[in-house]
Structures are given as C-alpha cells and as structure tokens.
Image (cartoon, grey):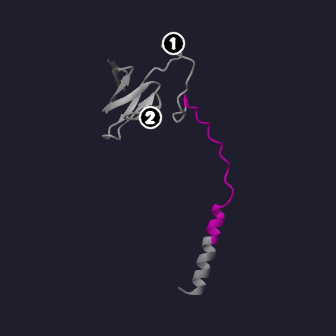
C-alpha cells in the first residue's frame, strides 16, 4: 500500500474512533444485589447453646467426609479431623462414604452426614 493510502486509512479510522468516543447518555446504576442470608465462607458460630442443646455442650454434626485411606478426613461441626485426631472429646476412628466412626468414652458412635446416629 502506498503511504498516502495508509495515511487516509489512518485518518478514517481516527475519525471513526472519535465518532464512537462521543459521550453517551449515562444509564442509571444497576439496582443493588440482595444481601445474602448468610456468608457461606464464614466459620460456624459457636453460641451459648441451642434449643436442642441448652447447656452449650458440643453437639457433633458430621458435615462431610473425604475417603482417602489413612489420609481420610471428616468435618465434625466445622472442625476437620484426620483419623486419630480428637475434637471436643470425639476421636475419629474410621471414615467411610457419608459417614464417620468416632470413639468417645470407650463407646463407638457412627455419625452420618444425613444426621443419623448409630451407636
């Protein structure tokens, strides 16, 4: 291409850019998003007790399991445990799909992620 043609093309593109850069009528800002009912990333709140447990004692709730042999994990009320570790007197003995076995005071307790307890 010749230099004259390139210059003409550059001027045309520049004019086109200026035409599109003209101010556009401002749109109103979008409506704010509704607030979340809870923060999914916040740690669980530890209160003085609930209706199910008015004394404030630790109530074990199995939230999830990760089965990986000796590296298996269980989430007990927001506390992630490896086999052999203990939380609030509950020692993790075994982890299976959707359930975990804990030992407390010489008694074995199997917790299920659905909330069922087998003793």
Query: For residue 19: magenta?
Result: yes
Q: Earlier in the sequence, mark 1 or mark 2?
A: 1
Identify which residue, 54 or 85, lies in the foreground.
85
In this rendering, would 2 be left or right of 67? right
Crowding around mark 1 (Cα neighbors within 10 Å: few <14, some 14 to 19, many 20+) is: few
Query: Magenta part mainly helix, strand or loop?
Result: loop
Query: Which numbered marker is on residue 80?
Result: 2
Q: Which residue is mark 1?
A: 51
What percent of the width, then of the height, locates residue 66?
Answer: 36, 37
- Most foreground residue, 19 or 35: 35
Q: Is residue 52 above or below residue 1?
A: above
Quadrant location of residue 48? top right
Q: Residue at x 69, y 56 (%)?
A: 23
Q: Which residues are magenta?
A: 14-38
Q: Which of these two is toward me, 13 or 56?
A: 56
Q: Residue furthest front?
A: 106
Residue 113 on image: x %, y %: 36, 26
On the rendered image, what quadrant is the C terminus found in? top left
Q: Residue 16 location, x and y as percent?
A: 62, 67
Name the one closer to the observer, 64 or 68. Answer: 68
């Amino acid at each position: 291409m010749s230099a004259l043609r390139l210059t003409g093309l550059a001027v045309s593109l520049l004019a086109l850019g200026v035409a599109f850069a003209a101010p556009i009528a401002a749109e109103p800002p979008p409506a704010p998003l509704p607030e979340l009912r809870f923060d999914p990333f916040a740690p669980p709140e530890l209160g003085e007790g609930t209706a199910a447990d008015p004394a404030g004692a630790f109530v074990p709730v199995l939230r999830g399991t990760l089965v990986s042999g000796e590296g298996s994990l269980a989430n007990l009320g927001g506390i992630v445990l490896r086999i052999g570790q203990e939380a609030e007197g509950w020692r993790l003995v075994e982890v299976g799909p959707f359930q975990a076995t804990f030992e407390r005071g010489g008694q074995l307790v199997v917790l299920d992620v659905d909330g069922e307890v087998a003793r």
